[in-house]
Amino acid sequence: MEHKRPLQSIPDDELLRRLADLMHQSRRVEADLVAHIGEVDERRLYAREASPSMFAYCTEVLHLSEAEAYLRIAAARASREHPILLSMLGDGRLHLTGIARLAPHLTRENQDALLKRATYRSKRQIEELIAEIAPRPDSPAVMRKLPERRTLSIPAPPLGPDRVGLRVPELRPDGVPSPAPVPSPPAVVEPLARARYKVQFTASAELHDKLERLRALMRSQVPDGDLAAIIEQAVAEKLERLEARRFAKTRTPRKGLSKTDTSSSSRHIPAAVRRAVQERDGNRCRYVDEEGRRCSARNRLEFHHRHPFGLGGDHHPQNVRLMCRAHNAYLAAHDCGREAMARHRGSRSRAPAKGAGPDGPGSGGSRGRP
C-alpha cells in the first residue's frame, strides 16, 4: 500500500496542481450535495428522519453549521427554478454565498444577464451588483440613546465630473463630515456557565419606561430591583396565560380527564385532553423515526390524531399527540395520500383567513388533514 507523501515534501507546482484538482472535485461534490438537498427538501423526506424542517435536518442529522445549512438550502431551492446555478456552482463560476444573495432577485427574464455579470465575482461585488439592480431607500434619521462609540471620520471626496450624482457624507457646520450612524447590534443570547445565560438587546424608550414602572411596582417582591428576576416573573405570568389558552393549563381545572367525554362528536379537543397530552409530550413534537430519533421541534405544535378524526378517531389522549406542523402534514400525507393533501393545501390557500379555533392558532384537532 502506497503511503501518502507529507505535504511539506511536495514541490510547489505539484502542490498547487493538487490543490486545484481538489478544489474542482470539491465544487463538483458541492453541486451534487446541493442538488440532493434540493430533492430531499422537495420530497420533504426530512420529516421521515425526525426533523421538522430541512434546516433542522441539515443541522441535527447532517451536522452542518447553521450558516452552512442556510447557504446550501437557499442554493438548492433557487437551483430548482434556475438549474444553471448548479452548473455554475460546480465549475466555480458562482459560490454558495453569491447564489444565496442573488436568489431573491433572479427571474427567468434577467437570469442570463444577471448571472453573466455575477460570474467569478466576490461576495462584496455581488452585493454591489444587487444594490445596483435593486436599490433601497436611504435609512431615515433616528434619535436613540446608546453608549457613545468612537467613529472614524472620512473627509468628503471633492465633487467633479466623475463624481456627479454620488451621495457624499453630510457635513457639520465646522466642515467635518458627520460620522455614519452605527447600526444597533442584534439581540445576543450567550451561554456563560451551566444554566446561566447572557441576554442582551436594544430596548426602545417605551420598553425602558415599562421596565422602570414594573420595577417600581414589584419592589415588595424583588426588593433589590434585580431586572433579571423581574423579567423572569413577568415572562412566567405571560407564559402561564398563553399556555392556558393554548393547552388549557390551569391550577384549578374544572373537570378532570376521568369525567371528560372524549368521543368524536365535535372537532373541539376537550381541555382535559389538551392538558394531559401537553404534559405527557412535554411541549415537544412526538414524532420518532425508525432510528429512534425524536423530533426536536417545540414551535407551532399541533394536536394530531393517530386514527384520523375524519375517519372516526376520538379525542382520547392515547389517540392524540403533539406534532409539529411538518410532521402533522407528513403523517396526514401518509394516511390520505400526497395528491389529496396537495389538493387540500391548495383549497386552504385560496380560502379566506379565519380566526383561531378553540385550541389556538394552528391547532385545530387533526389540522392538516382533508
Image: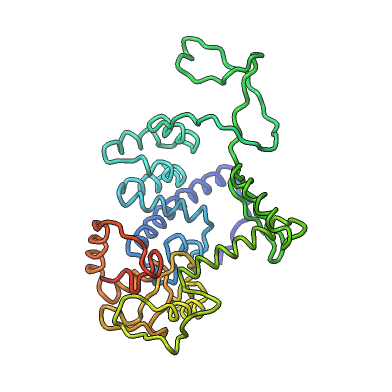
* Quadrant placement of the C terminus: bottom left
Give the x, y percent position of residue 177. Answer: 62, 19
Q: Which color scheme did the rendering employ for the protein?
A: rainbow
- From the viewer's perspective, is residue 118 above or below residue 350? above
As drawn, is 173 to the left or to the right of 84?
A: right
Which residue is painted at 49% across and 72% down in the image? Answer: 284
The number of numbered discs placed on residues in the rendered structure image is 0
Q: Residue drawn at (39%, 56%), measured in percent from left and top?
A: 32
Q: Is 131 above or below relative to 207?
A: above
Question: Against 130, is 67 above or below?
Answer: below
Q: Work out whether 258 lies above or below 200.
A: below
Give coordinates of residue 90: x percent, y percent. Answer: 40, 48
Q: Horizontal placement of 340 versus 50: left or right? A: left
Q: Position of residue 120 (x, y in %)?
A: 43, 37
**Residue lying farthest right?**
224
Q: Is residue 9 visible?
A: no
Coordinates of residue 99 in the picture (x, y in percent): 41, 44
Q: Residue furthest top?
A: 161
Q: Residue at x 58, y 64 (%)?
A: 237
Can residue 29 be seen at all in this image of the molecule?
A: yes
**Residue ID at (72%, 63%):** 221
Return the residue nearer the eye: 106 or 294.
294
Question: Would residue 72 be found to the left or right of residue 169 on screen?
Answer: left
Residue 39 picture quarter: bottom left
Relative depth, front residue between 140 and 186: 140
Please state which of residues 56 and 23 is positioned toward the viewer in this rendering.
Answer: 56
* Quadrant (top left, top right, bottom left, bottom right) of the N terminus: bottom right
**The residue positioned farthest toward the bottom in the image shown:** 258
